[in-house]
Image (cartoon, coloured by chain):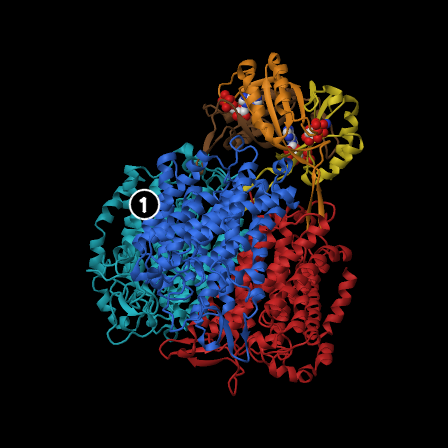
Chain colours: A yellow, B orange, C brown, D blue, E red, F cyan
Amino acid sequence: MKLITAIIKPFKLDDVRKAVSEVGVQGVTVTEVRGFGRQRGHTEIYRGAEYVVEFVPKTKIEIAVADTLADQVIEAITKAAQTGKVGDGKIFVFDLAQVVRIRTGERDASAI
Amino acid sequence: MKLITAIIKPFKLDDVRKAVSEVGVQGVTVTEVRGFGRQRGHTEIYRGAEYVVEFVPKTKIEIAVADTLADQVIEAITKAAQTGKVGDGKIFVFDLAQVVRIRTGERDASAI
Amino acid sequence: MKLITAIIKPFKLDDVRKAVSEVGVQGVTVTEVRGFGRQRGHTEIYRGAEYVVEFVPKTKIEIAVADTLADQVIEAITKAAQTGKVGDGKIFVFDLAQVVRIRTGERDASAI
Amino acid sequence: MSKLSRLLLLCALTLPLPLQAVWADDASSASSAASTVTTVAPAAAPAAAPTAPFLVTTDKINSGDTAWMLTSTALVLMMTIPGLALFYGGMVRKKNILSTLMQSFAITCVVSILWWAVGYSLAFTPGSTPYLGGLSRAFFKGVVYMHDAGKVSVSHLATTIPETVYALFQATFAIITPALICGSFAERMKFSAMMWFMAVWLIAVYCPVAHWMWEPSGWFAATQLDFAGGTVVHINAGIAGLASALMLGKRQGLGKEAMAPHNLTLTVIGASLLWVGWFGFNAGSAVASDGRAGMAFAVTHIATAAAALSWMFTEWLTKGKPSVLGIASGAVAGLVAITPASGFVSPDSSVIIGVLAGVVCYFSATSLKRALGYDDALDAFGVHCIGGIVGALLTGALVSKEISGATGSVLLQLKGVTATLVWSFGMSLIILKVIDMTIGLRVTAEEEREGLDISLHGESLE
Amino acid sequence: MSKLSRLLLLCALTLPLPLQAVWADDASSASSAASTVTTVAPAAAPAAAPTAPFLVTTDKINSGDTAWMLTSTALVLMMTIPGLALFYGGMVRKKNILSTLMQSFAITCVVSILWWAVGYSLAFTPGSTPYLGGLSRAFFKGVVYMHDAGKVSVSHLATTIPETVYALFQATFAIITPALICGSFAERMKFSAMMWFMAVWLIAVYCPVAHWMWEPSGWFAATQLDFAGGTVVHINAGIAGLASALMLGKRQGLGKEAMAPHNLTLTVIGASLLWVGWFGFNAGSAVASDGRAGMAFAVTHIATAAAALSWMFTEWLTKGKPSVLGIASGAVAGLVAITPASGFVSPDSSVIIGVLAGVVCYFSATSLKRALGYDDALDAFGVHCIGGIVGALLTGALVSKEISGATGSVLLQLKGVTATLVWSFGMSLIILKVIDMTIGLRVTAEEEREGLDISLHGESLE
Amino acid sequence: MSKLSRLLLLCALTLPLPLQAVWADDASSASSAASTVTTVAPAAAPAAAPTAPFLVTTDKINSGDTAWMLTSTALVLMMTIPGLALFYGGMVRKKNILSTLMQSFAITCVVSILWWAVGYSLAFTPGSTPYLGGLSRAFFKGVVYMHDAGKVSVSHLATTIPETVYALFQATFAIITPALICGSFAERMKFSAMMWFMAVWLIAVYCPVAHWMWEPSGWFAATQLDFAGGTVVHINAGIAGLASALMLGKRQGLGKEAMAPHNLTLTVIGASLLWVGWFGFNAGSAVASDGRAGMAFAVTHIATAAAALSWMFTEWLTKGKPSVLGIASGAVAGLVAITPASGFVSPDSSVIIGVLAGVVCYFSATSLKRALGYDDALDAFGVHCIGGIVGALLTGALVSKEISGATGSVLLQLKGVTATLVWSFGMSLIILKVIDMTIGLRVTAEEEREGLDISLHGESLE
Ligand SMILES: Nc1ncnc2c1ncn2[C@@H]1O[C@H](COP(=O)(O)OP(=O)(O)O)[C@@H](O)[C@H]1O
Ligand SMILES: Nc1ncnc2c1ncn2[C@@H]1O[C@H](COP(=O)(O)OP(=O)(O)O)[C@@H](O)[C@H]1O
Ligand SMILES: Nc1ncnc2c1ncn2[C@@H]1O[C@H](COP(=O)(O)OP(=O)(O)O)[C@@H](O)[C@H]1O
């Protein structure tokens, strides 16, 4: 099993969720994060004091999938989250040692 | 070493924290997340406009443990977080390549 | 490739970001989290009702790096985030199976 | 719970009779006091003072008094929305904030309509018994302004301002009283049940009690000193709050889960607006823009400051830190306690009232509640009922004949207080029980868990 | 869009002429009504009533009336900042909250200066035509208080209070009207464009329409019943809102992305302060602290409560849940609808007005908007224009001669309403079009995505 | 730091003497002006004007004046809680919001009690020297309302309203002045130290300065034009703020960490309530509901709008974007600057005052602060002291004899300003130094890091 983590632009969340649903993903976990990278932040000024806000709001989604589904999901995310502009984000893929569904105690494949 | 990640119902956090403490866990990191899965969200209506909020508030906990402790911790979480209703959440287990305690620079086992 | 995750004290974020930039890191993802560990929380009292807030605000940073850079980054973080007091936090290192840059579809090394 | 309530239901049903018996001859026994006691109308009445609202020519209206009463009415409305709504709203958990605001707002609306329909008439016109007013002013019948004729109706309780203004001023009191009760059953009551409860409670409890204390022909009007509603508003609401806390039971997870206030900034805004608005409440109760209003104004402010400090220091001493919620709660306790006293006591006395109110309410909202174990969530009972009693009794002890022309006694005060406690507690239990047996009082466990904002109103705070 | 607007631009440019033709002889045909109609000055005028502001000795000033009007002015200012600012601010997305507050605040400032410079004079002094006032009071020339001489200027519309107070009271109306428009184009307009639009709109639309309805020599002054600005303020602003919603187009992602209000606590605070402040708006429009003010006060409160409940129950029935946004919106709808009627109708009638306003505005803000497809973001059109029309017409139907000394008719009301609708809609389109062709109306797509707080003002909410 | 302060301690201790020497004969040298100058009581005094509070029969009370003063008092209280509390609270970091609100609230309470005890008497009764009042009104002794006797006490500064109302009105000024100082030492002062500082400062600085300027026998009463407290309130508080910023030192991490305001919505609410409440502050300072109050009202509003725009445009030009914090700060700067001028100048002049105040305060709150390097966290000095000086001097230049019956000069203004600057700065340093040496002024580094909400008050915002 793999855990696919994607850092995307927040307004793309709905598109991505739909895209991965279509390839068969049944669960997604989402976190609000801030990202620092090639995309620049913005400047705020309060009574003359300038603050460079270097971090940009991003959304992190995590999806646990069977190995077989991984590539499809990665592709679906890439397509749905792409705007072509700097800051579209990254996908990180990890090996998952084990998965448990808390409700039933099911493990691995059947737990996803 | 393993990193055990659990997505649970927010109101179960205290129970889970206590349960893992009992089996010897000394540190936990917690993140507010939103989950999409079998459990349905809710609908909000503002001046006639309906918004289906598909994501449910969830809490993610992360616990780094020695391999030997992993199964016990997983069991403790499963038991403490279970309500038996859809949406109880998942446990994801990862292999940890390395751990460092920042304060002391200690590594791996002694850093947890 | 590795994903380096560090749980640090929030006010150290800027220092850490600068430190890792200096050793060549180009992207960082940051999450507000709460931590439970050796460092104690605080007590709040509202009309006589005492609430022990056991969790302390922490900041989680995630950095994907090439294997070669990993040690340097770990060192940079350790140095920048250290105050020497309990609660300085942890670094967790994971193996990254794959990385994709969404904007270009680039993979792995060139995607970081 | 259900046993207790069945018992109380029974005894409450038979309540009016013994009460009547016990106090029946109070009015006469206190007649010596009666003649010197004026509760809200400070000016000496002319030969044959009117006993019901009447028409006057428009030149009888005092524009200064009217200006102050218009302002006071706006101020007292502001006490409930947004004042009280925010004071309470800041103390609940984030998932229940909108439902808490909704309670104050909806009560404002429903009470306003009922007040126009029957409430004003039942409270502020003479009735056939001293227990309740008549229906002569139902639907504001006879509450008029005649442009070409140059006439306007006035209340016999406030002869220098238009009756519309007096009726509206009193409406804002009728609004805030039920809204105060919400503090006790916060975070768990069904909205529909709350609406029914408040509508019935207004007619069955508020109107009679207001009539008893304030309408000149009312049961305690001649003996009770209640300048601005310590008994009518605060004791009345507070004890009804206790009844509802008992009937509804505790919030899920109380004592186990953290139930820390989600946003004390809102609570501070609320407490501040309550303080500001309370000038309208207390000084407005002089129904004139005169020296008595000024004195009521001054003692209100001083007592509030004293109570806020006394709560704060008590907490600082006992718990180690002075808290924002503490000082704000203390201010409200002071405002409550000075309410009945405001037109009757001197600045010196107001300091005493304030200091005592702060300390007593601190303990009632912390120790007493814990000791007895009811879940008076936001301390409507602990602050308003207890603070109201402190104020009512001290009014009897500290009343200044120089300032008010009136005399009183702790014992006389105790009678009106007891009647109110018994009636309001009993009737509240009955009404709540009936609602519980029909549509149910409490949201389901799952709705409570999810939060009332989403489950009851389909809305949430980002 | 651009075709439509070009068309409208054309027709609007030629608009004043036909309007003038069509209604030219109204004033005379309605003269029988005219003699009995008094719009804002309730007291019968003496022999030769002044037709322009004039000097009086200071003893002619009524301190009670002045006290109430000073208070009313403060209340109406509070309606815009922070009232309306918060009411709107709570409904937008978090990334646009500060820009929304900024609109109300900046409008307050710019209108105040323009009002002093020319606005007051154009609206409230007689001009050479019935369509616009003169410039005799430009820069408050002649608006004086003379300490040693013991003299003070008064407006011919309010002879018992200093002219400064009347001019300021009216300034607060001139402030809130443009601020209301912002609801329609929320979350997408450039700040610079908004500033230009509002400045021009004030002079080109607000001042004339206020003059038509209220200045005794104005076009509709003798025939239109508009006690506190149902037409001048609400219809006027609401229809200009529709024009701006059409000209600016929809917000990006509307119907696709969630655009849920980010913080309804702010909206409830705002609605509450609007309610409280509206007492100054409506009862203040009596320009006196008297029985008529009292009646305006009472009906305002009752209608508001009725409308809030009627919106809430309509929503409860049709959507299954009563919402906080709903009850607050209903209250505002009621306040809007009772505005023109407030000094003219009885409490009974106010209930009718309130109930109808709640239901009608509920449907206009939900179904109508969806059906027609414009993006009236916060329903300035749906609530203020539609609610204003409901109120204006019902005022004609329900006016009480006893209360107001005036008569009226739905038809007469319709004329003033139509003139306002046409003029405000046409002129708004023209002004917006010109701005669009010069500096542009709308922020870029990326600025809109990022949020106006950061992109326009360089600030954000944590 | 400690060297500097030791120096100042010394010189401040010896300060009263030289001050006395330097200005000793001002009162006489300015006597020609004195006879034509009236500061707050606009009406011509009868033959032998009373020089101390006295008793009148209740019919001497003007109900309209009283109504406006009751309202004004409520408005000015609202300026501090919640107005100023929110204005400041929104600008700090989230971890310090509650402690910031707590400062305003606790100051309100402690000043109220001290005002009743001695403050009112020290400031507003004649004393044995022109530097401080007596103790005849300590504990409000003699501040009475006699119901049966039909008598009421009035202040010699306000003979048409009850003394209670005047004393309370002035209490709200005494409350907001120390509360303003908090802006300078925000986010780092111990609560206990702050309480001591404010209590002592009220007696040692506020009461004397108020006496100097306003009590007819005061040092500058005959020469200084300070209608509503430009010097007494704003310069006084602002310079004390500078003293505290210097004594406490900078916040940890200043210039390194982001210290962006956490919630400008609160700041906008605060600024709006300050604006609304300031009508009570300035127009209320006429102590009557008359033409002068009206004029003060009008110029206050116009100057505020002008200053808000002038700050906004200055920022827009120099920094590229108009900001919400900017326009709100500008409004406050305008309110500050027009305060001393409000009963003395014409609307035209008020525009000048507003525009200048906006520009000057913009630069003092941005460039000056950066240049000099003190950490005046929320610009109490930059806006209130600098804005107050702008206003005080311009009052001397622009005073209208027609409006006020008074004359003045920049030079005369400068004297009162300088005396206030020196006394307030010196005494503040002394008081702070003493507190620092006893209980300590500043929280520990770790408490500051954790936030004052949790470390001082054991509470936090979710
Ligand atoms: N090496 C990295 N480790 C962790 N997160 C990263 C890394 N590089 C980028 N990110 C995340 O991806 C986001 C987008 O990256 P950025 O460099 O701005 O644009 P792009 O991916 O289009 O090159 C960043 O805001 C950050 O959250
Ligand atoms: N495949 C997945 N990848 C990541 N997170 C998941 C996945 N499936 C479920 N989750 C998380 O677990 C939560 C619970 O899952 P859900 O399907 O609702 O119930 P259950 O676990 O009881 O079957 C979801 O809200 C989501 O946060
Ligand atoms: N075993 C663990 N698993 C996950 N997170 C941990 C673990 N131990 C500590 N942490 C995180 O690291 C933070 C610091 O740990 P703590 O024990 O307080 O101090 P220190 O790292 O200095 O010993 C904690 O607040 C928590 O967020």
Q: In the depicted view, which residue is nearer to us: C104 or E208?
A: E208
Q: Residue at x 66, y 45 (%)?
A: D458
- Image quadrant where residue F28 sits: bottom left
Q: In the depicted view, which residue is nearer to us: E213 or E389?
A: E389
Q: In which quadrant of this rendering is ligand 2 seen?
A: top right
Q: Position of residue C62 (x, y in %)?
A: 61, 28
Amino acid type of the residue that numbered disc 1 sits on in the rendered structure: Phe
Left or right: where F74 falls relative to F154: right
Question: Can see residue C40?
Answer: yes
Q: Position of residue D378 (x, y in %)?
A: 49, 42
Left or right: where D336 falls relative to A6: left
- Examine the rendered structure and indicate whether residue E415 appears above or below residue D424: below
What chain does badge 1 belong to?
F
Q: Position of residue B70 (x, y in %)?
A: 62, 15
Question: Can see residue F187?
Answer: no
Q: Residue at x 67, y 27 (%)?
A: B89
> The C terminus of chain E is located in which quarter?
top right
Q: In the depicted view, which residue is nearer to us: A20 or C45?
A: C45
**SS class, disc 1:** helix
Q: Which residue is mark 1?
A: F197
